Structures are given as C-alpha cells and as structure tokens.
Amino acid sequence: MWALIKKEFKSYFYSPIGYVFIGIFLIAFSVSFYFSVIQYGSVNFEYTFNSLPTILILAFMVPALTMRSFSEERKTGTEQLLLTSPLSITKIVLGKFIAATLIAVITEICTLMYFAILCYFGIPHITTVLVTLLGFLLFMMTYIAFGIFASSITENQIISVLLTVAFFIITWILPEFNSSFESISLINLFYKFTLGQIDIADTVTYVTVITTCLLLTIIFMQRRKSVR
C-alpha cells in the first residue's frame, strides 16, 4: 500500500497538477490574506481560510486534483492492471485518498508562511489558528473523498469535475433555502473551527462523510472487479 501511496503522490508532481493546485491555491490565499487581514490590520489569521477567494478556488481546484484518480485509469486502459493487482480494492482506494490528502497537507503547511508574517507584526491566537487548520484539513479531506468517488463512477474527467463541484455548491447553498440543511453544509461546519471551537458533532459529520464516500468508492470498484 505504501508503494501505491508513493506512486500516486509522485504522479501529482510528474504532471503539472500538483504544482498548479498548490500554486493557484496560494495565489487565492494571498488575495484573501490581504483583504481579510492586512487591509484591516487584523491578527485573525483564521479569517483567511473562510474568505470567498479561498473557498471559491478550493471548489474548483480539489476536483482538478481528484478527477484523474480512477477516470484516467479507465480511459487509458490501465484500470484492468489496477483491478488485477495483488492489492485489495480497499488499499487502492485508501492509497489514492491518502496521496491526495498529502497534497492538501503540503498546501496547508505552505500557508504557514503567511502566519509567520503575521507573527512578525502581531500576536495571533495560536490555539484558534491550530483549530482552524484542523478544520480546514477535514474540510478538504471530505471534498477529496467525494472527488475520488466521483472519479470512480465515470471515465470522463470533466464529468468527474462537474459532479464534485456540484456537490460542493449544493452543500454550500442549501442552508440559504432551508436552515435545516445547515448540519450538512461543509462550509458551515468549518466556520465553527475558525472560531477556535472543536465541535464533536461537526467533526463526526466530516469523518462520516469521508468514510461514506470512501466506502461507496470501494463498493463500486469491487463490483467492477467482480464483473471483470
């Protein structure tokens, strides 16, 4: 499994996608940092993660990161090799998920340079920042898990992207129509983390969605394997 994780992780940097994901995200994060922190002379670093430029670019960049997970394997004909490999479907799915999550972790680590700049000019609330980083990682992991599921059900990468973006937007705007949907809004769940609050129920919701998406991916791929 570790060999698969290493292979998948390296593949993000053998192609431009890894560099593009990190680069474009940091550009959007820079814009958010300026308008949310610098412009107001604030030391609330956590606001940068919840600002519109950061959220919008994440909505489109995560699908770009996950679209090739299984769609590309199917399109290029290498899926057969994957399904007949000694590794179980569970390990294959987890390997792809962990590799994509590592890209997200590296991206988060890169944002700490903005935190260092902020520390030079003020004293941010470190506990709140750490909780925000945890929440943002859970947020991205949930989105990644769905993106991998979307990639597993189609060989068209564009369709995979559209499905993942649609999932993100639907969970974002549903609370605007009915407040009862607030509990399934990924962004609303993340907002509490930016306040320095680790809500057990929200954390469980994130983990549940991640687990569900990965299980659905495993089940779908297992069925494809049995058909083969």
Image (cartoon, helix red, strand yellow):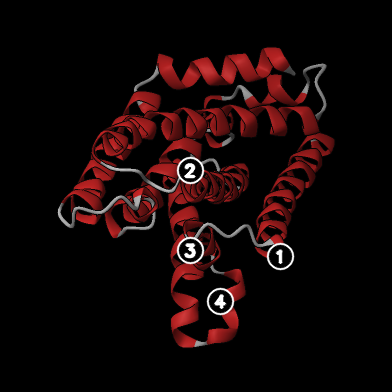
- The structure residue drawn at horizontal position 25% and vertical position 47%, both measured from the top left corner, is 33
200 relative to 118 in the view: left or right: right
Q: Secondary structure at mark 1?
A: helix
Please give the label number shown on residue 191.
3
Percent x, y of residue 143: 54, 50
Q: Please state which of the two labelled residues, at mark 3 or mark 2, is closer to the viewer.
A: 3
Percent x, y of residue 107: 42, 32
Structural distance between the alpha carbons of marks 4 and 1 = 13 Å
Q: Nearer the viewer, residue 5 or 206?
A: 206
- The structure residue drawn at horizontal position 23% and vertical position 39%, both measured from the top left corner, is 121
Report the quarter where the C terminus lies.
top right
The residue type indicated by label 1 comes to: Ala
The residue type indicated by label 2 comes to: Asn
Structural distance between the alpha carbons of marks 3 and 2 = 33 Å
- Look at mark 2 in the image and give the residue it sits on: 156
Q: How many marks?
A: 4
Please give the label number shown on residue 68.
none
- Are there few (<14), some (14-19), or many (20+) residues within 10 Å of tag 3? some
- Look at mark 1 in the image and give the residue it sits on: 201
Q: Nearer the viewer, residue 83 or 63?
A: 63
- Look at mark 4 in the image and give the residue it sits on: 182
Q: Is 144 situated above or below 53? A: above
Q: Please state which of the two labelled residues, at mark 2 or mark 4, is closer to the viewer.
A: 4
- Are there few (<14), some (14-19), or many (20+) residues within 10 Å of tag 1? few
Tell me if label 2 and label 4 are in contact, CB under 8 Å: no
Sequence-wise first label, 1 or 2: 2
- Are there few (<14), some (14-19), or many (20+) residues within 10 Å of tag 2? some
